[in-house]
Every structure is written in C-alpha cells, then in structure tokens.
Amino acid sequence: MKEKGRKPIATNRKARHNYAILDTYEAGVALVGTEVKSLREGKASLVDAFATVDDGEVWLRGLHIPEYGHGSWTNHAPRRTRKLLLHRREIDSLIGKIRDGNLTLVPLSMYFTDGKVKVELALARGKQAHDKRQDLARRTAQREVTRELGRRVKGM
C-alpha cells in the first residue's frame, strides 16, 4: 500500500524569525536507506542546515539525521552533505538570484510526499535586529486589534 498525502518530519521554526523569505522551492533529497528509515521515525534537525550551489548542483549542508538504531555497518554519517534534486531551470534561476544580492538558501521544512522525502527550500535575506523588533511589534499590534474586535463582537 502506497503512502498518500504530506507527512511532516521536521520544521525550521527559527528560519522565519531570522530571515525574510522571498521565494520558496520544493526539492527532493538524495538519501541512503538508513537515512530514510531514521526519518520515518521522525528524527531530523534543520537547526544549522543551509543549502549551497556548487558546480551547477544544489547541496544541503548541516542537516542532522541521526544514525538508524537497527542499522549496522551500513549506517550513514549523521551530518553528511546531501544532494538536492531540482529542475535545471530552477537551479539556474537560483544561481542568478544568489549571485545578485546577499541571499541565502534556507530549508524551512522537511516532509514525506507520497512516500518521497522533500525539503521546502527558501530563498531568503537575513534580518537585522531592528527588522526582528518591527516584526514583533507588528504581530503584537495585530494580536491586540484581533482581541479588541473579538471583545466588541461579544459586547464586552
């Protein structure tokens, strides 16, 4: 029986806080068997992960997939560099955008789609401290407005 739908494995919650997301891409990941088995157990960390474009190929670095518990000598290295699978035109587009400005590729989430491991990759620009404070103030103000509207509707 084949899996259907989208099953999340890991998310990078700090990415949206530390970066302004400009564009997102879905990429496949070239993995070995024990990595997939470890991911099926829900074990992965995107905390220090980032992607680079080297010689026309996109590589995911810093992704931590712990060794599979029942694996033997076939186990993988937990932080090895993994190849991302994208269409050639997407890779060419990324190369052009990264070369132009100070942009980076950050993985936002990792998930299974119909039994295949996918990574949501974001083209992002780093935020400065004042940008983060503005976002926090904007969210707080929006929360207050929503709360006040809720009170008015209830007649309080």
Image: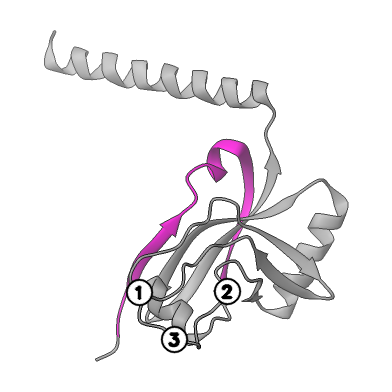
Discs 1/3, front? 3
| Residue on which the image places disc 3 | 72
Q: Quadrant of the C terminus?
A: top left
| Residue on which the image places disc 2 | 77
Res. 28 image quadrant = bottom right
Res. 27 image quadrant = bottom right
Amino acid type, mark 2: Ala
Residue 97 located left or right of residue 12: right
- Asked whether the viewer can see residue 7, the reply is yes
Residue sitting nearer the eye, 8 or 143:
8
Residue sticking out furthest to the left: 155
Discs 2/3, front? 3
Amino acid type, mark 3: Ser
- Reply yes or no: does residue 46 show up in magenta: no
Q: Earlier in the sequence, mark 1 or mark 2?
A: 1
Q: Position of residue 48 (x, y in %)?
A: 60, 52
Instruction: Determine the residue positioned at 49% across, 72% down.
Output: 118
Q: Earlier in the sequence, mark 1 or mark 3?
A: 1
CB atoms at circles 1 and 3 under 8 Å apart?
A: no
Instruction: Determine the residue positioned at 59% across, 26% down.
Output: 132
